Image (cartoon, grey):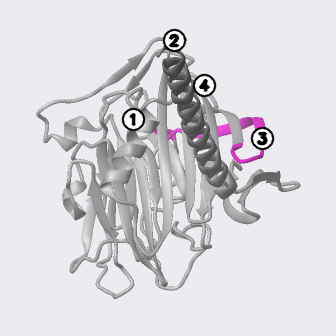
């Protein structure tokens, strides 16, 4: 009997070992498939230009532009993995039929409307010289790191200044780029350190902004008029042609124009571009102030996450001002996903991705 039990136990152990081996091999194969799908990221600077190009799978994904002729550094243009340009061209390039409102909306950026009374968001070449003193400027002075691989890294240092070059905030930003044949990811990790006592006064226009291509706008039947806090009026023309197919969906189920001013962990903009569906999703992070963020998501193509616009988004019921003493810092973490194919990424998939992003080590910047 004892001999039988020993033999039986040995067989059981061998069976478990075989099972574990099979599971391990399957997991290794699955991981190898996932790794094989990840495309190589290449980062290169253009000579004699403040421009860095990011390629994924040997195709241009985006460029980091930081000349002083721009009032802020931006990622522009941005392409889906199938080569479709998902950002508006204006004001740097004008494509037929594109809207030309809001000249400060360029590619992907991070700024804010009211920092110690200065407007960093709305500054552009269109502001007349006599009003420039009301606006801030973000000047990039150092590229800290560029490296490629299955994850590309680009880090830079910039100063948030007034028009006389007095520094209010020091910005350190790290971009992490990655992609697969139908997917692109940008992780933006930004730290803002106060060089003086700072007040971010609750305002509508901020923080992370993206201006999308015409095809991703939501159709509208009438012109829209928007007025900023300085009384400047911008007219956005109606979008009633067949090219505009855009829509919004948030993690809370808000759709279309109803997404604006609501809070959610993520917001997806999606539509038809050519033969494929395109989706762009911005995911908020628990390490950000006032999480989950409010969405400054306009149908005309401005797609922004603003945790510091609570006053206008709640019709004055509450507000969120952010104070930093000299030497203190605040961090902002965002993940931007760009997908193309027959179908857009689902809400269930995005919830899983948001949970994964929430576990990201926010101290890695």
Residue 136 part of the magenta segment: yes
Q: Which residue is mark 3?
A: 146
The Cα atoms of the two marked residues, 1 and 4, are separated by 28 Å
Label 1 vs 2, first from the N-terminus: 1
The Cα atoms of the two marked residues, 2 and 3, are separated by 30 Å
Residue 99 visible to the viewer = no
Q: Which residue is mark 4?
A: 364
Position above or below: 87 against 134: below
Q: 83 and 40: which one is in front?
A: 40
Q: Which residue is mark 2?
A: 326
The Cα atoms of the two marked residues, 3 and 4, are separated by 16 Å
The Cα atoms of the two marked residues, 4 and 2, are separated by 23 Å
User: Is there a contact, CB below 8 Å, between mark 1 and mark 2?
Assistant: no
Residue furthest to the front in view is 1
Residue 135 visible to the viewer = yes
| Left or right of residue 132, residue 300 in this image | left
Q: Which residue is mark 1?
A: 114
Q: 316 and 216: which one is in front?
A: 216
Q: Position of residue 72 (x, y in %)?
A: 59, 46
| Element carrying mark 3 | strand
Magenta stretch, residue numbers: 133-152
Q: Position of residue 256 (x, y in %)?
A: 23, 64
């Amino acid at each position: 009997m004892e001999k039988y039990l020993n033999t039986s136990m040995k067989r059981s152990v061998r069976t478990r070992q075989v099972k574990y081996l099979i599971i391990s091999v399957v997991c290794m194969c699955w991981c190898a498939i996932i790794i094989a799908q990840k495309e190589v990221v290449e980062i290169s600077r253009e000579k004699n230009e403040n421009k860095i190009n990011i390629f994924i799978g040997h195709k241009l994904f985006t460029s980091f532009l930081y000349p002083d002729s721009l009032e802020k550094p931006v990622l522009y243009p941005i392409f889906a993995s199938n080569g479709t340009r998902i950002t508006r061209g204006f004001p740097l390039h004008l494509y037929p039929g594109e809207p030309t409102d809001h000249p400060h909306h360029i590619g992907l950026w991070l700024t804010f409307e009211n920092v110690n009374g200065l407007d960093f968001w709305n500054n552009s070449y269109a502001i007349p010289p006599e009003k420039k003193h009301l606006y801030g400027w973000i000047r990039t002075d150092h590229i800290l790191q560029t490296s490629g691989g299955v994850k590309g890294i680009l880090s830079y240092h910039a100063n948030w200044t007034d028009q006389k070059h007095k520094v209010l905030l020091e910005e350190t930003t790290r971009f992490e780029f990655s992609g697969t044949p139908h997917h692109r990811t940008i992780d933006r990790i930004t730290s803002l350190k106060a060089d003086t006592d700072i007040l971010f006064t609750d305002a509508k226009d901020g923080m992370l902004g993206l201006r999308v291509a015409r095809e991703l706008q939501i159709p509208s039947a009438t012109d829209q008029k928007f007025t900023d806090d300085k009384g400047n009026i911008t007219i956005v023309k109606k979008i009633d042609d067949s090219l505009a197919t855009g829509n919004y969906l948030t993690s809370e189920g808000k759709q279309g124009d109803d997404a604006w001013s609501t809070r959610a962990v993520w917001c997806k903009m999606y539509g038809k571009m050519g033969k494929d569906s395109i989706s762009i999703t911005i995911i908020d992070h628990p390490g950000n102030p006032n999480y989950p963020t409010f969405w400054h998501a306009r149908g005309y193509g401005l797609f922004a996450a603003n945790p510091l616009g609570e006053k206008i988004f709640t019709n004055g019921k509450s507000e969120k001002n952010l104070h930093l003493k000299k030497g203190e810092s605040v961090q902002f973490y965002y993940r931007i996903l760009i997908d193309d194919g027959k179908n857009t990424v689902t809400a269930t998939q995005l919830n899983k991705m948001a949970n994964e992003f929430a576990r990201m080590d926010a101290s890695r910047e």
